[in-house]
Amino acid sequence: MAPGYDDLIALVGAAASDPRMVLLEGAHAVKHATRFGAQLVGAVTPDRAKIEALLADLAPDVQLPELTIEVGRDVWLQLTAKRRLPSPIVAVAHRPDVSADDVLAATGRVVLLEQPRNPGNVGAVIRVAAAAGAGGVLVCGHTDPWSAMCIRGGAGLQYALPVARSDGFPRTSRQIVAIDPAGRELGSEAIEDDAVVVFGTERGGLSAQAQQRADLTIRIPMRSNVSSLNLATAVAVILYAYR
């Protein structure tokens, strides 16, 4: 039986803590997730006409799920915890069953993030990886790349490529390329088409394990006295430099 109004409201409220579900916040997340095969259960909005007009303008190929309900302002604020979303819609979708092994079996280069702390950065990396045609993204650490904040940062593009989380550094026969200031100059060495490219934490850089496991270490040249790049920017530089 399809969920009704009360069921959908309850589902939206519980989806953030349900490992089987994903919250898609904003029209861009709904658009990308739908285009890449997400199974939407339903959606909630305080202004259906506005969302329909927005999708008609930006993504005429995307339709709202059959179960889309319009709610009053009080219910909307409760469901979104008074957060200001980029556009007024929240949808619930089934989370795909993707493991770390699935990511490492994907065709193409894999982006591996070690212990990232900022969910927005993780989402932005996924967005870059999808745009650049990476094989997948693997997050090693506690940050869930399918959380609502990561989905928002990734604009729903988690559905465009294999994305998963792992507790520890994975074992793989693929070439491991570490990105570190002590490495060789960007572009001076070729990397394999299925390499696992490892990026360290936003503040601390690579772990000792990653440095030891690396077959090759590459640095991104930067102006003197500039110490670092945003994580997603660094990922973009590497993926496009070796695309």
Image (cartoon, grey):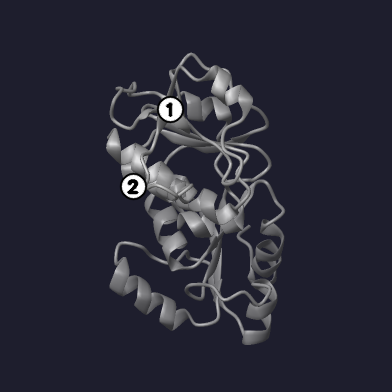
Which quadrant is home to the N terminus?
bottom right
Residue 31 in view (yes/no): yes
Q: How many marks?
A: 2
Outermost residue to the top: 173
Quote the CA–CA distance across marks 1 and 2: 26 Å
Circle nearer the N terminus (1, 2):
2
Q: Nearer the viewer, residue 142 or 41?
A: 142
Which quadrant is home to the C terminus?
top left
Q: Position of residue 17 (x, y in %)?
A: 72, 54
Q: Position of residue 40 (x, y in %)?
A: 51, 56
Tags 1 and 2 in contact by the CB under 8 Å rule? Answer: no
> Mark 1 falls on what kind of element?
strand
The residue located at (52%, 72%) in the rendering is 89
For residue 194, side relative to residue 158 (left or right): left
The residue located at (52%, 17%) in the rendering is 172
The kind of residue tagged 2 is: Ala
The kind of residue tagged 1 is: Gly
User: Which label was assigned to residue 224?
Assistant: none
Identify residue for label 2: 131
The residue located at (45%, 17%) in the rendering is 215
